[in-house]
Amino acid sequence: MTRMRVAPDQSDQTARLSLVFFVFLLGTLAGIALAVVTDALSRTNWGGPNWSFVGNGALVVLFSGVPAVAAGGWVALALWRVFHPRWGAAALAAGLATLAAAGFAGFGPVLALALQGLDTPEAPATLEAARLTLATTFVAPIALAVVAGLLLTSVLVRLTRRGAAAELVLALLACVVALVPRGFFVWVFLLAPLLLPLMVSLPTIVTAGQVRRGPPLIGNLWLAGACVALTAGVLAGVIAAQWVQTR
């Protein structure tokens, strides 16, 4: 009798560990794909006024794609575990919204120059130029991520106070971090890839756990573990692919 009670628990534990490992593998494949695309673009001559994918210019693809994959995967896991019928479409929407927000952050200075009708970044700095750069690089990505996160949650499940509060805290944190004079590169290559996918996905993650269609497939801790495994897998895939490319 004791063995019969323990066996199901062990089976469930094994199934959850297998899920986390499977998610890690999917993340690794996505990371490898992103690294390959980034490398391929870096070898082209694609570009335009004040921007180019040649060399390190292609890194903007990597630093936009990784957050997009993370946000889409997190939303997919959060909705799949509560049997939501549109978890795949939600993941795609979250990924595209994060890709757009991170793209705004990366191409913000280019857009600012374009809006001023300038063809060179050597133009004299003005107050108007500073405002446009702030708007396109910091304000627009944060606003897009917040709107996408709240809209996605409202359409798919039901936005709760807890989800809205989580989004508000993240938005305020992003605004404070963005206004600290840390520089464009720190924002684009470190802070934006971390905060933007959280702003898009967190309201859905928080709310989905409260709007269930039955007992969830995995608990909150296992959901967190799967999200971490996905992110770690993407990063591992990127690093492994870049290591192979440099050999």
Image: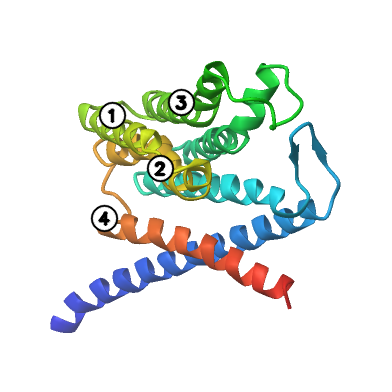
Pointer 1 and pointer 3: residues touching (CB < 8 Å)?
A: no
Q: List the residue tagged with mark 2.
A: 195
Q: Nearer the viewer's eye, disc 1 or disc 3?
A: 3
Query: Foreground: 47 or 221?
Result: 47
Q: Residue at x 43, y 24 (%)?
A: 147
Position of residue 153 relative to residue 197, above or below, is above
Residue at screen point 76% across, 26% down: 119
Name the residue beneath numbered marker 3. 139
The residue sitting at the left extreme is 2
| Residue pictured at 63% horizontal, 46% vertical | 60
Dot in front, 4 or 1: 1
Q: Quadrant of residue 150?
A: top left
Residue at image location 30% in from the left, 26% down from the top: 159
Mark 4, Cα crowd under 10 Å, few <14 / some 14-19 / many 20+, is some
C-alpha gap between disc 4 and disc 1? 25 Å
Answer few, some or many: residues within 10 Å of disc 1's Cα (few below 14, many 20 plus, some between 14 and 19): some
Is disc 2 surrounded by few (<14), some (14 to 19) or many (20+) residues within 10 Å? many
Q: Amino acid at mark 3?
A: Val
